[in-house]
Image (cartoon, rainbow, N blue to C red):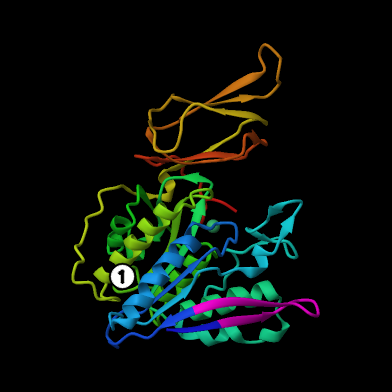
Amino acid sequence: MENSDIIIGGDTAGIEWRVPVYRFKGSDKAAPSVYIQAALHANELPGTALLHFLLERLCKADAEGAIRGDITVIPQANPIGLAQFHFGEMEGRFDLGSRTNFNRDYPLIALAEREALLENFSRRSAADRLKRTLLHTALGHDLMLDLHCDDESLQYAYIDDAFWPEAADLAAALDMRAVFLSDGESTAFEEAVGFAFKHQGGEKLTSVPGRLAVTVELRGRRDVYPDMAKRDADGLWDFLAGRGVVIDPAHAAKAYSGPAIPLDNIEMVRAPEPGTVLFHRDIGDNVKAGDLLATLITRPGAPDGTIDVTAAHDGLIATRTSARYARRGDDLMKIACHEATRKDREPGTLED
Ligand SMILES: [Zn+2]
């Protein structure tokens, strides 16, 4: 195992960001190579905890000669976001200097154009250089896993159609409750990697066997516990064993039995008016159209000062906001429905 730092010079004098990288050399050139990163949104730490325990296992495997494919692990990908503490809270999702999301604005390029990511490098901002360095590193591998989490959430993932159903092994290994089939049209990290994998020269590929780009949502932001992280690390190990990246004679393949849902079937439940949120239903609940999901106290103390928010379709509550005050239009829940919930959605991610 080789441990080094990616070094990103800051945008002001005297600042330098360091991103620790762990690289394992595989024994078999024919085995798939894998890139795994966590906490690109710096305040999403379940993946960092997972990778801490996975790295422990990989180091042991390395000593035993059980690593077949090259593995690169970046357990804490975003030191810039990590340092953005203001008034006691971390802003890990958006770069404060540019107000851009750390998981958007990745260049959509063909795989052959990988080196162009590093052109005019010194003239780019630190956040942009960080993004391009991570993407450039990821594109040197066959499989890419970007570990995120939602707010309050079940275990689920965004997976492009091009990698499905081959990626059902990952969904099974991590005990996912749902898979959202994304359309690969935004500029998220996973979609930029997926875009490059689908554009390997010539026609755009609709299926890319042996490749993977996925955003894993490891439950909610507060779901950072030792047992959970170790269980997820074991799950990811199982996935790597199944793909032949590591050798584990005890590996047994599991089947994924959860739903795989197009993004058009995700109902984004939004607050119709601002108010204090009283939830009646929780993540993991199956709901029917018309069921009461939440009451918003819009005018506290007034006899008619509340409004009800109900489900528009039957489905599974996958995520819920942890905020208990909603502004007008804020997302309250994502419900994975059995049918399309809207036809006007632009392809790409559900959230900004
Ligand atoms: Zn995220």
| Residue appearing at x 61%, y 31% in the figure | 272
Amino acid type for the residue under numbered disc 1? Leu
SS for callout 1: helix
Region of the chain picked out in magenta, as a range: 5-21
Residue that extends furthest to the top in the rendered view of this protein: 303
Q: Is residue 301 left or right of residue 186?
A: right
Chief secondary structure of the magenta portion: strand
Q: Quadrant of residue 330?
A: top right
- Given residues 256 and 119, the one toward you in this image is 256
Establish whether ligand 1 lies closer than 8 Å to the Cβ of label 1. Answer: no
- Residue identifier under label 1: 240
Q: Is residue 84 left or right of residue 70?
A: right
Q: Position of residue 346 (x, y in %)?
A: 52, 53
| Residue appearing at x 35%, y 51% in the figure | 176
Q: Is residue 327 left or right of residue 243?
A: right
54 is higher (above) or lower (below) than 343: below
